[in-house]
């Protein structure tokens, strides 16, 4: 048979492709490494396939196990009205496997997963990263505008900084209700608590960061069972996935809303302790409240973990010792104290609200960056809730008014803040119990520098000029 002319060959090839129909979409796959209890390295794969890929450890195949299948969870009560809720469709399979502590290489489907070093020297802290769509609050963030919702830019800058570990202080999913009809700011956005919303708010924009460093993840109030808890349990939680803890049934929420604290070693006598505060209220908890009992148990567990290291950082979503602010119509700014629910439980157990050896508190929830250090023996509080969601714009002062305190008995020595801007916080080890902290904008540019020594910190600037 003679050689076919190239033009006719491509014409026939095109006709054959046209008859075959559109090319099948590439299977979805997102891989990342989570840090679990005692530094366990938990490899995760989120895939559109119904089966799990193999993991290769130092070149040898090792099976992954299905954590959660493709499924639709029946509609359950949520924080939204029933008319603004729907069943959570999980169109992906979640797979996991624990990588050996001595593994030098871990790969899934040809992708290399980041492994932590024995001594973590460079950390990033981010939080509150999703795009806010909430009908009851009238909140419409411009999810389609990368300047108004820059989490993808922040995640790329985090990856460029090459951290050893990324700490997320909670609140990943904010697309809770539908974009208003005709609103171009968020037109076409997925909403609800299924995998499409999780992909839009975290799994996809975070991709470069997921490939760059292992993750230590705290759970926020947006991941409570009546919000994004179903996805949290499937995708990001490091505890066992069970029907009772899945958040699929409201009757099991007293199980699903709580998780045991755990420690992630940082080497050289330092560790993170991650604590699930997702279901706490802003106001004091009654002694009879089931949450009070569970948080008392958690305090005891935190104390046991903290006794194993000389320098501890407690990571949770709600700031125990930080300020929030509100502004009256006349422009007067009032400082609000730290989380009243945790203070009501932890306060009777310790005058500093934390066990001994806890030097640093890392939290989010307030949509800004903030540091509060004390002359009393309380741990320094950092808030890093400024990495994607709509920012708080009420300015904090360079120093609190006389007598102002985030908690009873806490005497403020210094504070620092940045409002109305998106970014991330970096921490570089400077010695035993010492860290150099830098506040960075969404491109990674340094805006402020702080030094942590033990349980105290000082910053070069008490107030970074607002981004607006």
Image: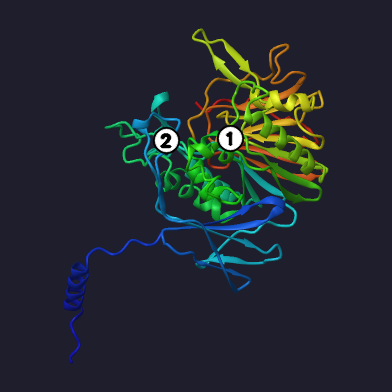
In the picture, the disc for residue 4 is none
x and y percent of residue 447 in the render?
A: 62, 34
Q: Residue at x 47, y 39 (%)?
A: 150
Q: Nearer the viewer, mark 1 or mark 2?
A: 1
Q: Is residue 142 left or right of residue 333?
A: left
Q: Residue at x 56, y 41 (%)?
A: 256
Q: Residue at x 56, y 10 (%)?
A: 332
x and y percent of residue 148 in the render?
A: 43, 34
Asked which secondary structure carries label 1, the reply is loop
Scheme of image coloration: rainbow
Q: Nearer the viewer, residue 170 or 401?
A: 170
| N-terminal label among 1 and 2 | 2
Q: Which residue is mark 2?
A: 176
Q: Which residue is mark 1?
A: 278
Residue 448, picture quadrant: top right
Q: Is residue 97 left or right of residue 248?
A: right
Disc 1 to disc 2, how far (Cα)?
Answer: 16 Å
Q: Categorize mark 2 by other alpha carbons within 10 Å: few (<14), some (14-19), many (20+).
A: many
x and y percent of residue 123 in the render?
A: 67, 46
Residue 251 higher or lower than 32, as above or below: above
Residue 155 higher or lower than 441, as above or below: below
Q: Is residue 139 visible?
A: yes
Q: Nearer the viewer, residue 144 or 439?
A: 144
Q: Categorize mark 1 by other alpha carbons within 10 Å: few (<14), some (14-19), many (20+).
A: many
Residue 361, picture quadrant: top right
């Amino acid at each position: 048979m003679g050689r076919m002319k190239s033009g006719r060959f491509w014409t026939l090839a095109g006709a054959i492709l046209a008859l075959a129909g559109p090319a099948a979409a590439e299977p979805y796959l997102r891989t990342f490494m989570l840090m679990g209890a005692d530094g366990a390295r938990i490899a995760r794969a989120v895939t559109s396939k119904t089966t799990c890929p193999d993991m290769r450890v130092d070149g040898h195949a090792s099976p992954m196990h299905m954590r959660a299948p493709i499924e639709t969870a029946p509609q359950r009560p949520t924080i939204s009205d029933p008319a603004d809720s729907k069943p959570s469709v999980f169109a992906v399979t979640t797979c996991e496997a624990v990588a050996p502590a001595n593994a030098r290489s871990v790969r899934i489907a040809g992708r290399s997963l980041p492994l932590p070093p024995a001594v973590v020297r460079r950390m990033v802290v981010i939080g509150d990263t999703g795009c806010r769509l909430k009908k009851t609050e009238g909140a419409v963030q411009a999810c389609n505008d990368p300047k108004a919702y820059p989490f993808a830019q922040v995640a790329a800058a985090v990856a460029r900084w090459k951290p050893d570990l990324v700490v997320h202080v909670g609140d990943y999913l904010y697309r809770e209700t539908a974009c208003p009809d005709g609103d171009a700011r968020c037109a076409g956005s997925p909403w609800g608590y299924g995998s499409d919303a999780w992909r839009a708010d975290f799994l996809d924009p975070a991709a470069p960061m997921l490939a760059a460093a292992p993750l230590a993840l705290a759970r926020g109030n947006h991941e409570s069972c009546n919000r994004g808890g179903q996805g949290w349990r499937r995708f990001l939680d490091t505890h066992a996935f069970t029907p009772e803890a899945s958040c699929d049934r409201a009757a099991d929420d007293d199980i699903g809303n709580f998780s045991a604290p755990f420690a992630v070693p940082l080497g050289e006598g330092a560790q993170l302790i991650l604590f699930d505060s997702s279901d706490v209220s802003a106001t004091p908890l009654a002694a009879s409240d089931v949450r009070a009992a569970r948080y008392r148990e958690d305090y005891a567990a935190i104390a046991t973990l903290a006794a194993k290291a000389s320098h501890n950082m407690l990571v949770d979503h709600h700031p125990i010792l930080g300020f929030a602010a509100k502004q009256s119509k006349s422009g007067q700014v009032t400082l609000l104290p730290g989380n009243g629910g945790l203070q009501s439980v932890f306060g009777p157990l310790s005058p500093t609200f934390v066990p001994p050896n806890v030097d640093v508190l890392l939290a989010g929830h307030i949509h800004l960056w903030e540091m509060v250090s004390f002359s009393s023996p309380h741990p320094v509080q950092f808030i890093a809730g400024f990495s994607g969601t709509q920012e708080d714009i009420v300015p904090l002062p360079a120093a609190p008014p006389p007598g102002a305190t985030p908690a009873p008995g806490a005497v403020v020595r210094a504070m620092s803040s940045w409002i109305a801007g998106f970014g991330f916080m970096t921490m570089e080890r400077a010695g035993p119990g010492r860290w150099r902290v830098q506040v960075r904008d969404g491109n990674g540019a340094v805006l402020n520098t702080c030094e942590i020594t033990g349980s105290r910190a000082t910053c070069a600037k008490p107030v970074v000029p607002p981004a607006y």
